[in-house]
Structures are given as structure tokens and as C-alpha cells.
Image (cartoon, grey):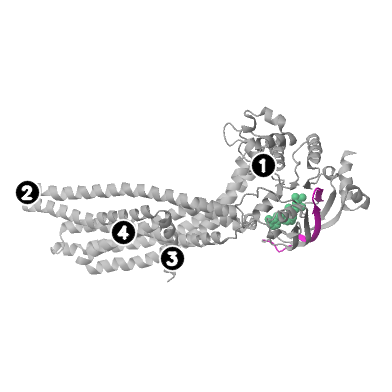
């Protein structure tokens, strides 16, 4: 019963392959049947005919020319088996290609549509990585396993059928032995899959530490801090743990499958010995005996190892398909794939009313009964200690998380009621860990407004506004130069230069609310000052939200909101907050004292 349940999920995987590539999958089945029948029943009969004829020529002095017919039959059969084998490989490649064409885009599309909470959650991210990395390989493996099982079943039926005609009990003995073997294989398969899943945790850690040791990103710190050996030891430790774990599971697995195939070997030898009697009594021809022994060794090989592996793969598929279904059931964000609306809304206000929020993976509230109002055309600054909740506020504002308590009103209407396209067109955001796209400078900027018109003119403007003009002059192919070091002719930029590119991306966007989370952290003080002066001028009359720890840069905001532990501690203009002598004044004085 349990086995049938397991097979059910395996069949689900098989069905997916048939849907992706119906013609090739059916052709493959036909070719497998031809190959299996030719190499068992066909080869047994042809070998028997050849050996019997040869024996008669030798013992009874029959004409030696009689050998040509069975010899040609034997050679023809081998030719057929080889040719069918070649077609099987070609058909398999076609199935693999079709599976890739059908499922890779589907998986990628699902990935791009997932709710943000799944992307940020550790558990669902592990599930997502496993499914997106392994689905194509696994579908192909399951299909191969089913085809291998089909082949084995044909082998067993045809060989056992012939044996049954001569020594019926031997056939029954072999059949009965295969049942516990199947059961052992399925159990081994499930354990193996669980172990692989658990060992992935070690693999990921090992991979991460490898990146730390060899990656370009950490080269300066690695050299300066000289932590190479320390990380190497950690790598060694994790690698050893993973290796020992896998070894333990493989040893158990090998013992189970190899042990059972050893038992099968003994049974087959006994059957071979038993079949000698019918040969001596003339009941079984010596040719048929030779043919059957060859076929029995073939069956032994397939039952002992291939069958175990195929059943194991199908049992693995059972576990994986459960995960695949879970992956397909992950919530999608409605309209995630939609482009931003071409015409952004006319923004008048954004209000948080008593908003409380905790991340889905956590019990602790990060925002607590938070209320504030942003109005059109004003510049706002969110300041506060690390972990106060500033970035979290922007995630809620932009609709990335919808599971908040209280109300968020955009132009007086609940934020959740807006379509994804409208929200995307309403906000443009640069995070502290902004993205670096290894494409041309122009494409890096245009990503900020892919549906915009008069792009070339606007690209020139934002290049100027973000202070990128001098950088463009230095680039080999101007704005068409590939950035980053992925390709040979790519040109890397400094941290500050990349940050300017991210700012240009935000500037080109026509979104009415611009959010900048530490937008100038990588700039030197002179560049930061110049850029802020410029941004102030550019943002005049526009709605902006700046998040910054450098209070000199937020001084001129129309309103500063000081966030502490998920709520507003104080708010007002710079002068009002300084006069209030609260946390803002304390932080400002602390920073100023560095320069006096
Ligand atoms: N995806 C997440 N899941 C669970 N907790 C999170 C997640 N993202 C952030 N947090 C937690 O929420 C709290 C607020 O984080 P947030 O990034 O909003 O702070 P912040 O004020 O922007 O800090 P900083 O000034 O250091 O950037 C922190 O305690 C952080 O650990």
C-alpha cells in the first residue's frame, strides 16, 4: 500500500515528462520494449539455436554450412540491439530538451511571482533553491528509472517465462526473492534522499566558506586580516562533517542493496546448478542452457543493481514531488510579473495609522502601533539606531509585505487595494545593498523605467544629475560599456561609482515617491556633499524619503522622523528637534563632536 502511494508521486513526475514531450516519450517506450525483448528472449533463442547447431555439426557431422543461418540471426540481432540503442540515446536527448523548454520557464516564472515573505524566509528559500536547482534533472532521472523498470520487467517476464517452461520452481524462487529486494530499495531510497537534504546544509556552508576563501569580493579584508587559515580550518571542519555524514548513509545504503543482490546471486547459482539435470536427461538442450544462463546473469545484474537504483530514484521522486507540490503552492504575489503602470498616480498623501508588523518567520513585533503621514512635495528623513525598523517601514510602504495590522492609506485608500502595477509605478527605491547589474551602463539606468519614453534624452540628464558624466568619459564605449568583470571587456566601478549608477536609476524613474535608504554611504564626504546639494535641488517639490545615519545630510528635510524600536520617538524639523533636546539632538551633537 505504502509502496503504491510512493509510486503515485513517481507517476506524477512521469506524467509531467509525458506532457512535456509526448511523442518522444512514447517512441522511447517502444524502443525500450524492442531492445528488452531482443536482448532477452531474442538472444536466448538465437544463442540456443547457434550452440545447438554447432554441437550437431561437431558431434553428428552435419554440414558446417548449417552454422551460417544461426550465426547471421545472432549478428542481425546484435545489430538491431545496437541500432535501437543509438535511437534510444537520440530520443532521450530530445525528451530532455523538451522538459527543459517546458519546465525551466515555468519554474523561473513562479520564482519571480513569489510573495516577498517567501524570498526573505530561510525555510522557503531552501525549498525554492532545491526545487529550482533539481527539477529538470530529477524529472529525467525518474523517467529513466521508469524506463529501466519497464526494461527489467520485460527481462524478468521473458526469462522467467522460458525458465518456467522447463523448471517452474526455479522461476518462482527468483520472483519471490525480488519482492523483499524491492522493499529494501525503496527504504534505502527514502533514507538517501533525507540524508542528501540534510547534507545540503553542510554543502551550502562549505560553498559559502569556499567563496570567502577564494572570492574576489573579500580579497582586501582577507589579505589585511589574514584570516585565510582560520576560514580554511572552518571549511575543513564543515567539509569533514558533511563527508562523514554522507559516508555513514552511503555505507548503510550499500549494505542494504549489495547484501540483497548477493543473496540473489546465490539463488541464481543454485538455479544454474539445478538446470544441469534437465540438460543431462536431454530435456533441456545445451544451447538453451547456455542461452538461459546468459539471460539469467543479465537479469541478475538488472535485478540486483539497476532495479534497486530505479526503485530508489522513484522513492526519491516521491519525497521531491512533495516538495515540488509545496513549491507550486507557495503564495504568489498578485500582479508580480506586471510591469509598472505607464502613467503613475497623482500622489497626494501616504499615511500609516496604528501599524504593527512582525515578519512571518518571527513572533516579535518590529513595528508597534506606528502612525505618521507623508504629504506630496515634501522631503522626509527617517533616522534612528540600527535595527529600529526604518527599512521595514519602506518594505510595507511599497507593498512588499501585506500582513500588517492597522492601516496604510495611499491617497486615502488602503494600500492593499492598489494593483501591483500601480504600486511599482508609485515608488522608486534604492536600498543600502543596491543591485549591481553586470550589463551596460545604459541598461543599468534604464532598468529604473523600462516603459518610459524619450529615454536617450533622460539618460543624459540623469547621468549629469547623478554626477556620472566624468565616469562616462573614462568608459571605453561610453554608456554602452559593459559594467562588472563577468565578461572580458567589462569595466568594474568603485563602490561610490556604483552607488551613483543606482541613484541615476532612481532618478530616471517617474515614480512620484522616491525612497533612498543610505543612498550616499559609499561616497567620499566631498562627493556626498555635492550630490546632496544636487539631489535637494532636483527633489524640490517632489516627495522623497531619505534614510540616513549621517544627520548632516538629513538636516534640510521638511520633516525628520526619529524611529526607535518600531515607533516614532519624535518628529519635527531639524531646529525643532534640536530645541527639544531629545534623542535626535543627542545623536546630532555626537556626530558634530567628531568634527569640532
Ligand atoms: N526578513 C526579516 N525577517 C525577520 N526579521 C527581520 C527581517 N528583516 C529585518 N528584520 C529585523 O527587523 C528589525 C528591523 O530591521 P530594519 O532593517 O528595518 O532596521 P533599520 O532601522 O533599517 O536598521 P539599519 O539602520 O541597521 O539599516 C531588525 O531587528 C532586523 O533583524
Residue 494 position (above or below residue 42):
above
Q: Are marks 4 and 1 in contact (CB under 8 Å)?
A: no
Q: Counting residues from the N terminus, which is met first, the one under dot 3 or under dot 4? A: 3
Circle on res. 227: 1
Mark count: 4
Q: Which residue is drawn at the image coordinates 72% and 29% (left, top)?
A: 470
Distance Cα–Cα, label 2 vs label 3: 58 Å
| Residue 339, horizontal then vertical, whole percent | 62, 49
Q: Which residue is mark 3?
A: 8
Circle on res. 63: 2
Residue 596 position (above or below residue 36):
above
- Secondary structure of the residue carrying tag 4 is helix
- Secondary structure of the residue carrying tag 1 is loop
Q: What stretch of residues is rendered in magenta?
A: 361-383
Majority SS type along the magenta span:
strand
Q: Which residue is drawn at the image coordinates 75% and 51% (left, top)?
A: 347
Mark 2 or mark 3: which is in front? 3
Mark 2 or mark 4: which is in front? 2
Q: Which residue is mark 4?
A: 300
Q: Which residue is drawn at the image coordinates 22% and 55% (left, top)?
A: 42
Q: Counting residues from the N terminus, which is met first, the one under dot 2 or under dot 3? A: 3
Distance Cα–Cα, label 4 vs label 1: 55 Å
| Residue 260, horizontal then vertical, whole percent | 37, 62
Mark 2 or mark 1: which is in front? 2
Local crowd size for mark 2, using a 10 Å CA cut-off: few (<14), some (14–19), many (≥20): few
Is 377 magenta? The answer is yes
Local crowd size for mark 1, using a 10 Å CA cut-off: few (<14), some (14–19), many (≥20): few
Position of residue 138 in the picture relative to residue 444 (left or right): left
Distance Cα–Cα, label 2 vs label 4: 37 Å
User: Is there any visible trace of residue 142 in the rendered image?
Assistant: no
Tell me the quadrant of the picture where the N terminus can be found: bottom left
Amino acid at each position: 500500500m505504502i509502496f503504491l502511494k510512493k509510486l503515485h508521486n513517481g507517476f506524477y513526475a512521469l506524467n509531467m515528462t509525458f506532457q512535456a514531450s509526448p511523442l518522444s516519450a512514447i517512441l522511447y517506450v517502444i524502443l525500450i520494449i524492442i531492445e528488452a525483448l531482443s536482448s532477452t528472449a531474442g538472444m536466448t533463442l538465437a544463442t540456443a539455436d547457434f550452440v545447438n547447431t554447432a554441437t550437431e555439426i561437431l558431434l553428428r557431422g552435419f554440414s558446417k554450412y548449417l552454422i551460417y543461418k544461426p550465426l547471421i540471426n545472432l549478428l542481425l540481432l546484435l545489430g538491431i540491439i545496437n541500432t535501437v540503442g543509438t535511437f534510444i540515446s537520440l530520443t532521450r536527448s530530445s525528451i530532455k530538451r523538451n522538459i527543459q523548454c517546458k519546465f525551466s520557464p515555468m519554474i523561473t516564472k513562479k520564482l519571480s511571482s513569489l510573495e516577498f515573505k517567501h524570498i526573505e524566509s530561510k525555510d522557503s528559500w531552501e525549498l525554492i533553491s532545491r526545487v529550482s536547482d533539481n527539477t529538470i534533472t530529477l524529472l529525467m532521472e525518474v523517467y529513466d528509472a521508469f524506463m529501466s523498470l519497464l526494461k527489467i520487467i520485460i527481462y524478468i517476464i521473458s526469462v522467467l517465462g522460458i525458465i518456467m517452461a522447463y523448471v517452474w520452481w526455479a522461476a518462482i524462487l527468483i520472483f519471490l526473492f525480488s519482492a523483499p529486494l524491492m522493499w529494501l530499495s525503496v527504504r534505502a531510497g527514502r533514507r538517501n534522499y533525507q540524508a542528501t537534504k540534510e547534507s545540503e546544509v553542510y554543502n551550502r556552508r562549505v560553498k559559502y566558506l569556499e567563496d570567502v576563501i577564494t572570492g574576489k569580493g573579500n580579497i582586501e579584508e582577507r589579505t589585511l586580516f589574514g584570516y585565510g587559515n582560520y576560514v580554511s580550518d572552518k571549511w575543513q571542519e564543515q567539509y569533514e562533517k558533511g563527508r562523514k555524514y554522507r559516508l555513514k548513509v552511503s555505507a548503510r545504503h550499500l549494505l542494504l542493496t549489495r547484501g540483497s543482490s548477493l543473496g540473489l546471486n546465490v539463488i541464481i547459482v543454485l538455479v544454474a546448478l539445478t538446470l544441469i539435470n534437465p540438460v543431462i536427461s536431454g530435456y533441456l538442450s545445451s544451447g538453451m542452457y547456455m542461452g538461459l544462463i546468459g539471460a539469467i546473469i543479465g537479469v541478475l545484474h538488472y535485478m540486483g543493481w539497476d532495479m534497486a537504483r530505479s526503485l530508489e530514484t522513484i522513492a526519491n521522486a516521491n519525497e521531491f514531488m512533495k516538495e515540488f507540490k509545496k513549491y507550486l503552492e507557495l503564495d504568489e504575489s498578485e500582479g508580480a510579473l506586471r510591469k509598472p503602470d505607464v502613467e503613475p498616480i497623482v500622489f497626494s498623501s501616504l499615511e500609516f495609522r496604528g501599524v504593527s508588523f512582525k515578519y512571518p518567520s518571527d513572533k516579535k513585533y518590529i513595528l508597534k502601533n506606528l502612525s505618521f503621514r507623508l504629504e506630496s512635495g515634501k522631503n522626509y528623513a527617517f533616522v534612528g539606531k540600527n535595527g529600529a525598523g526604518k527599512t521595514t517601514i519602506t518594505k510595507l510602504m511599497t507593498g512588499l509585505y501585506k500582513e500588517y495590522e492597522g492601516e496604510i492609506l495611499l491617497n486615502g485608500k488602503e494600500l492593499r487595494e492598489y494593483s501591483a502595477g500601480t504600486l511599482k509605478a508609485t515608488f522608486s527605491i534604492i536600498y543600502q545593498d543596491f543591485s549591481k547589474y553586470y550589463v551596460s551602463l545604459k541598461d543599468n539606468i534604464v532598468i529604473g523605467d523600462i516603459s518610459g519614453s524619450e529615454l536617450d534624452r533622460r539618460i543624459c540628464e540623469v547621468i549629469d544629475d547623478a554626477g556620472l558624466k566624468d565616469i562616462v568619459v573614462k568608459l571605453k564605449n561610453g554608456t554602452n560599456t559593459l559594467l562588472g568583470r563577468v565578461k572580458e571587456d567589462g569595466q568594474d566601478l568603485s563602490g561610490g561609482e556604483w552607488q551613483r549608477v543606482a541613484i541615476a536609476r532612481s532618478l530616471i524613474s517617474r515614480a512620484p515617491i522616491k525612497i533612498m535608504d543610505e543612498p550616499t554611504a559609499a561616497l567620499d564626504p566631498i562627493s556626498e556633499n555635492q550630490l546632496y546639494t544636487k539631489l535637494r535641488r532636483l527633489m524640490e517639490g517632489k516627495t522623497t524619503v531619505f534614510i540616513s545615519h549621517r544627520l548632516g545630510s538629513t538636516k534640510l528635510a521638511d520633516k525628520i522622523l526619529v524611529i526607535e524600536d518600531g515607533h516614532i520617538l519624535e518628529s519635527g524639523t531639524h531646529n525643532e528637534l534640536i530645541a527639544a533636546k531629545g534623542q535626535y539632538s543627542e545623536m546630532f551633537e555626537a556626530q558634530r563632536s567628531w568634527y569640532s
